[in-house]
Image (cartoon, coloured by chain):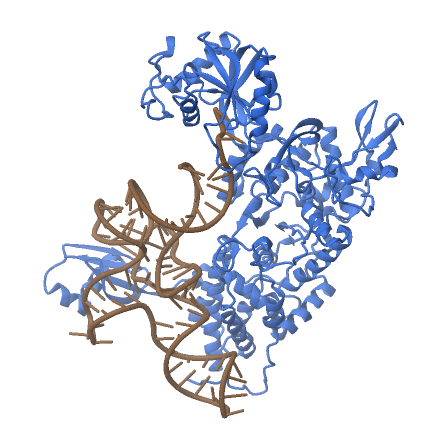
RNA sequence: GCGCGGGUGGCGGAACCGGUAGACGCGCGGGACUUAGGAUCCCGUGGGGUGACCCGUCCGAGUUCGAGUCUCGGCCCGCGCACCA
C-alpha cells in the first residue's frame, strides 16, 4: 500500500486552513443571506435554542456545546427542504448584570452593550445557521416596549395583581425574589440567606393555570426528566380543608389542609407555621410576648429542619368530629406559606408530627392499623381504629367518608392544593423594564396607555439598590411624578422593574415579528410560526423559564394573541459539559473554558465536531481537548479524499450500499440527537473514500454525499468543498441525499455459530437464507463437526441473518 | 430521604426488538516519510494462555438455546427536589 498521497495529474491540493475558511464563509453567508428565513415559506420549521445571558465572563464552551447541537438539528431540517427559522438574541437585563456592574463600578447599559457585542461575535464565529435579521436584545426599548405590553395584557386580564404578601427578600441583592429563585432558603444568585418581608408586590397569577399546565404536560413531546421536574414543581395534592374552632385567641377558627383526612381522629394538636403572617392572632393573650420572643430567636431557613422546635400558643382548638379540645402550637417545620399555613398534627401517622410529639410529650394515638406507633409513625394504609363510627373501614375509603362527615357539619371539604405559587415579578432594582403602571390616589394602579409605551428606563447615574424596599428609580422625581392617565390627578409611577424571567418568558413569540415596529405579535406571522417545533436548552431551566414561558403562552392564548396554549411542541434538554473533575461548567466554579482560542487554532468545524463527539448530546460529558486532534485528522482526510474523488464507477453496488447505509445512519442519529454516532458513521465513510482516492478510484457521488452529510456538523469546510466540487449554490440549502433502504441492504450476511451458547464458528451466506438451510450449513462447519464428535445436537435454534445455536 | 439517569478496555464512548461485546475516536506500541521536531499516512491494541483455549459489560441470584440488554436483591456514581402535611 502506498504511504503517501499520490499527486494526481493536474491537481495540486491546497493546504487546508480551517480558520481561513471560517472567515471566508461566514462573510459569504452574511452577504448572501444564506440563513435568512422566508417568513412566508410553505414548510416552516421553528428551531429554537435558548438565548444566552451575555455575562462579562464571555461565552464559554458549554454555551458553544448547547448552540452547536441545536444548530445541527436546524441545519439538517434546512437541508431536508424545510423553511428553518433559527433566531438568536440576548437576555441582557437582570440582577446578575447589574450586580456585576456595581462590582466594577460601570453603568450596566455600557457594560451590557459591550457584552452583547462580544457574545454576538463569538456566536457568529461558531458558524451557526442563525437568521440574525431577527435578533432580539431584551434591553432594547424596541423589545421591552412589548414586554411592557405583555404585562399590560396580563394586568387587563386580571392576571397581574398588586397586593401585599410575605415575600422572599435577599438582604444582599436588596430585592425580592420569586419563590423559584430561592434555593434551600438562600438566594439563588448570591447564596445569602433569604428573609421574609411583607411588601406590596406585583403577583402574576400562575396558579390559575396550575391544573391546565399539569394536564397539558402529558401530551408534550419533552424530555421526560423535564416533565417530571415540572410536575413536581406544580405539586398537585388531593386532600381536604378542615375547620377547627379556636378558643382563647383573636381568631375564631383555623382551617388546615391535609392529604390524610382519614387520620383526622388521630389529630392530637395543631401546628401553625412559625412564619405565618398572622401568627399573633393564634396566640393566647398572655403568651403573646413569649411567642414573639421565641419567634425572633429562630434562625431563619436552616438547611436541616428540626422537628423538635416549637412553642405552645396557649390556644385550644375544638376537634370538628369529636368535640375534643387539642392544643395549638407553632413550629418552623410547618410552612406558613403553603396551603393554609397551618396543619392538624397526627403524630401516629406522620413522622414529622411524631417526632414533634415525642419532643414535647404530646399524645400519640393510633387510628390506622398496620404499624406500631409507639416506635414510629405508620404512614401506610390500613383499617381505621379509634375512629368512632368509622372503625374497621379501610383508610382509603376513610378519606372519602371523613370528608362526607365534615361536609355534613359544614366543617370541611375536599380540596386540591398546588405547590405552585403565584409569581412575584416586581424587583426593587434598576436594570430591568419599568412596570408600566401609574398609581393614582383615586383609581389605584392604572396601566400606562399602550400608545405611550415604552416607559423608558430613565438614565440615572446612581443605580445602586436602596435596600428600603423601593427601587432606585423612586429617586428620579421628574420621572416618577405624572398625572393619572384616567383622571389627570397627580400620581406616581410604579418604580419597580420586572423580573427578567418576564423578558425571557415570551421572546420566542417575538422573534417572528421583530420586523413589526407597531405590534408585539403580528397575527399572521404568529400563526405561521408558533408554536416552536423544536426547543433545545439546558435543563437548569426546567422549572423556572419553561414554567413561566408556558404560563405566558397560555395566558396570551386565552386572549387570542397566539394560536396554541403550549409554546414548545418538542423540548430536549441538552446535557451539561463538565470540566476539571467535578461539576458543570460555570463562572462561579472557575472551570470555564473559552472556545475562542480553539476556534482560532483548529477552526470552528473542528471544535463543533469535537464537542458533538464527546458523548451523546442529551447526556453531556467531560470536556477535554485531547480528542480534538482526531477531528482535525478527520477533516484533513475529508479535504483530501473529496478533492481526489471523481473516477469511480457510480453503479458499484457495494459502494452504493455503503453510501446508503451511511445516509441512514446519519439521519437516524441526527433525529435522535445522537450526534456522536452520526460523526462515527462519517468517519467510516471518509476512511473508505480516502482509501479509494489513494488508489485513484474514489467516486464523486460518494464525495458529494459525504459533503452533504457533513454539512450540518462542519458547515464551513463542507461549503468550501461543495464549491470545489463545482456545485452551485450553498450546500446548506441543497437537498439532503436521498436514501433508499433497499439499496442499503447487504446481499450476504455473516452467521455466528454457537455451541451451547459459545461462539465456535462463523460462516457467510446469502441474506434471508431459511432456518433449516442455516442449520445444515452450521452443522457442516469443520469446527462444529469436531466439537459435536458425531453426537446429534439436542436442540437447534436458528435465527435467519443472525445466529445458529446448537445445544448438546 | 424521595424522584430520574447511569456503572462496558488505559480513556471518551458504540451495540436495532435478547442473537459474533468493545463501532468511532483518544492514548499507547510498531512502521513509513522527514536533517529534526510537529503534522500526515499505514498496521496493531479487552485480559490471560500464547494453536483454533479460558475469562470478561459494578456484585449476587433468576428467566432463556442464548443476557451489556429482561426480572429480583445489593453496592457505587451523577443530576433534580428536599419540613409542601
Q: Nearer the viewer, residue A740 or B12?
A: B12
Q: Is residue A388 above or below residue A674?
A: above
- Quarter occupied by residue A81: bottom right
Position in image of residue A364 (x %, y %): 38, 18
Residue A241 visible, this orientation? yes
Position in image of residue A313 (x %, y %): 53, 17
Q: Residue at x 48, y 74 (%)?
A: A689
Q: Nearer the viewer, residue B62 or A328?
A: A328
**The C terminus of chain A: image quadrant:** bottom left
- Left or right side of A249 for A89: right
Q: Residue at x 14, y 65 (%)?
A: A787
Position in image of residue A331 (x %, y %): 51, 25
**The N terminus of chain A: image quadrant:** bottom left
What is the number of callouts on the image?
0
Q: Nearer the viewer, residue A424 or A305?
A: A305
Give the color of chain A as drawn.
blue
- Quarter occupied by residue A130: bottom right
Give the color of chain B as drawn.
brown
Q: Is residue A522 above or below residue A380?
A: below
- Left or right side of A522 for A704: left
Amino acid at each position: 500500500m502506498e504511504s503517501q498521497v499520490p499527486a494526481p495529474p493536474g491537481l495540486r491540493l491546497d493546504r487546508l486552513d480551517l480558520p481561513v475558511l471560517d472567515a471566508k464563509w461566514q462573510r459569504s453567508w452574511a452577504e448572501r443571506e444564506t440563513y435568512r428565513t422566508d417568513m412566508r415559506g410553505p414548510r416552516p420549521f421553528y428551531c429554537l435554542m435558548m438565548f444566552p445571558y451575555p455575562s462579562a465572563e464571555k461565552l464559554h464552551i458549554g454555551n458553544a456545546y448547547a448552540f452547536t447541537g441545536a444548530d445541527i438539528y436546524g441545519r439538517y431540517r434546512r437541508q431536508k427542504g424545510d423553511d428553518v427559522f433559527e433566531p438568536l438574541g440576548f437576555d441582557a437585563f437582570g440582577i446578575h448584570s447589574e450586580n456585576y456592574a456595581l462590582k466594577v463600578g460601570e453603568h450596566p447599559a455600557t457594560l451590557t452593550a459591550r457584552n452583547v457585542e462580544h457574545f454576538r461575535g463569538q456566536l457568529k464565529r461558531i458558524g451557526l445557521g442563525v437568521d440574525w435579521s431577527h435578533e432580539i436584545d431584551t434591553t432594547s426599548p424596541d423589545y421591552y416596549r412589548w414586554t411592557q405590553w405583555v404585562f399590560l395584557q396580563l394586568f387587563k386580564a386580571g392576571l397581574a395583581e398588586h397586593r401585599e404578601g410575605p415575600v422572599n427578600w435577599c438582604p444582599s441583592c436588596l430585592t425580592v425574589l420569586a419563590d423559584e429563585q430561592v434555593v434551600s432558603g438562600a438566594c439563588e444568585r448570591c447564596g445569602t440567606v433569604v428573609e421574609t418581608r411583607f411588601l406590596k408586590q406585583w403577583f402574576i397569577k400562575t396558579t390559575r393555570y396550575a391544573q391546565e399546565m399539569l394536564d397539558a404536560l402529558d401530551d408534550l413531546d419533552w424530555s421526560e426528566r423535564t416533565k417530571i421536574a415540572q410536575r413536581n414543581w406544580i405539586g398537585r395534592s388531593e386532600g381536604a380543608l378542615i375547620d377547627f374552632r379556636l378558643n382563647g385567641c383573636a381568631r375564631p377558627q383555623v382551617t388546615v389542609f391535609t392529604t390524610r383526612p382519614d387520620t383526622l381522629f388521630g389529630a392530637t394538636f395543631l401546628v401553625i407555621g412559625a412564619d405565618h403572617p398572622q401568627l399573633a392572632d393564634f396566640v393566647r393573650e398572655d403568651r403573646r410576648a413569649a411567642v414573639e420572643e421565641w419567634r425572633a430567636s429562630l434562625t431563619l431557613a436552616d438547611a436541616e429542619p428540626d422537628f423538635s422546635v416549637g412553642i405552645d400558643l396557649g390556644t385550644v382548638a375544638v376537634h370538628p368530629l369529636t368535640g375534643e379540645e387539642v392544643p395549638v402550637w407553632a413550629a418552623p417545620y410547618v410552612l406558613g406559606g403553603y396551603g393554609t399555613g397551618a396543619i392538624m398534627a397526627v403524630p401516629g401517622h406522620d413522622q414529622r408530627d411524631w417526632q414533634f410529639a415525642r419532643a414535647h410529650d404530646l399524645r400519640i394515638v393510633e387510628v390506622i392499623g398496620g404499624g406500631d406507633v409507639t416506635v414510629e409513625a405508620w404512614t401506610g394504609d390500613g383499617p381505621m381504629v379509634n375512629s368512632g363510627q368509622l372503625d374497621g373501614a379501610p383508610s382509603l375509603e376513610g378519606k372519602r367518608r371523613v370528608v362526607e362527615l365534615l361536609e355534613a357539619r359544614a366543617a370541611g371539604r375536599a380540596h386540591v392544593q398546588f405547590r405552585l405559587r403565584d409569581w412575584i415579578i416586581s424587583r426593587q432594582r434598576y436594570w430591568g423594564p419599568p412596570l408600566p403602571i401609574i398609581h393614582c390616589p383615586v383609581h389605584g394602579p392604572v396601566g400606562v396607555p399602550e400608545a405611550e409605551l415604552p416607559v423608558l428606563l430613565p438614565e440615572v447615574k446612581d443605580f445602586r439598590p436602596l435596600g428600603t424596599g423601593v427601587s432606585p428609580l423612586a429617586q428620579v422625581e421628574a420621572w416618577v411624578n405624572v398625572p393619572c392617565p384616567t383622571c389627570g390627578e397627580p400620581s406616581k409611577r410604579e418604580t419597580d422593574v420586572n423580573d427578567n424571567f418576564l423578558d425571557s418568558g415570551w421572546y420566542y413569540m417575538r422573534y417572528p415579528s421583530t420586523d413589526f415596529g407597531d405590534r408585539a405579535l403580528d397575527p399572521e406571522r404568529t400563526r405561521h410560526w408558533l408554536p416552536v417545533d423544536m426547543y433545545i436548552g439546558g435543563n437548569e431551566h426546567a422549572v423556572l423559564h419553561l414554567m413561566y414561558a408556558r404560563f405566558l403562552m397560555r395566558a396570551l392564548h386565552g386572549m387570542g394573541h397566539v394560536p396554541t396554549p403550549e409554546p414548545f411542541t418538542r423540548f430536549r434538554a441538552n446535557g451539561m459539559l463538565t470540566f476539571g473533575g467535578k461539576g458543570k461548567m460555570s463562572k462561579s466554579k472557575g472551570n470555564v473554558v473559552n472556545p475562542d482560542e480553539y476556534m482560532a487554532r483548529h477552526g470552528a468545524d473542528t471544535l463543533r465536531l469535537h464537542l458533538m463527539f464527546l458523548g451523546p448530546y442529551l447526556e453531556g460529558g467531560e470536556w477535554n481537548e485531547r480528542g480534538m486532534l482526531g477531528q482535525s485528522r478527520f477533516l484533513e482526510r475529508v479535504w483530501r479524499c473529496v478533492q481526489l474523488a471523481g473516477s469511480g464507477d457510480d453503479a458499484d453496488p457495494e459502494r452504493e450500499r455503503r453510501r446508503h447505509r451511511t445516509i441512514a445512519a446519519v439521519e437516524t442519529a441526527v433525529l435522535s440527537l445522537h450526534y456522536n454516532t452520526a460523526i462515527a458513521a462519517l468517519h467510516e465513510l471518509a476512511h473508505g473514500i480516502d482509501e479509494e482516492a489513494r488508489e485513484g478510484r474514489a467516486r464523486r457521488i460518494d464525495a458529494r454525499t459525504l459533503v452533504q452529510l457533513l454539512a450540518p456538523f462542519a458547515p464551513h469546510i463542507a461549503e468550501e468543498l461543495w464549491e470545489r466540487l463545482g456545485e452551485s449554490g450553498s450546500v446548506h440549502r441543497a437537498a439532503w441525499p436521498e436514501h433508499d433502504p433497499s439499496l442499503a441492504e447487504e446481499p450476504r450476511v455473516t452467521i455466528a455459530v454457537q455451541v451451547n451458547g459459545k461462539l465456535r464458528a462463523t460462516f457467510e451466506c446469502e441474506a434471508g437464507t431459511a432456518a433449516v438451510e442455516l442449520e445444515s450449513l452450521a452443522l457442516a462447519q469443520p469446527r462444529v463437526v469436531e466439537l459435536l464428535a458425531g453426537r446429534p445436537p439436542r436442540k437447534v435454534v436458528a435465527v435467519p441473518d443472525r445466529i445458529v445455536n446448537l445445544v448438546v
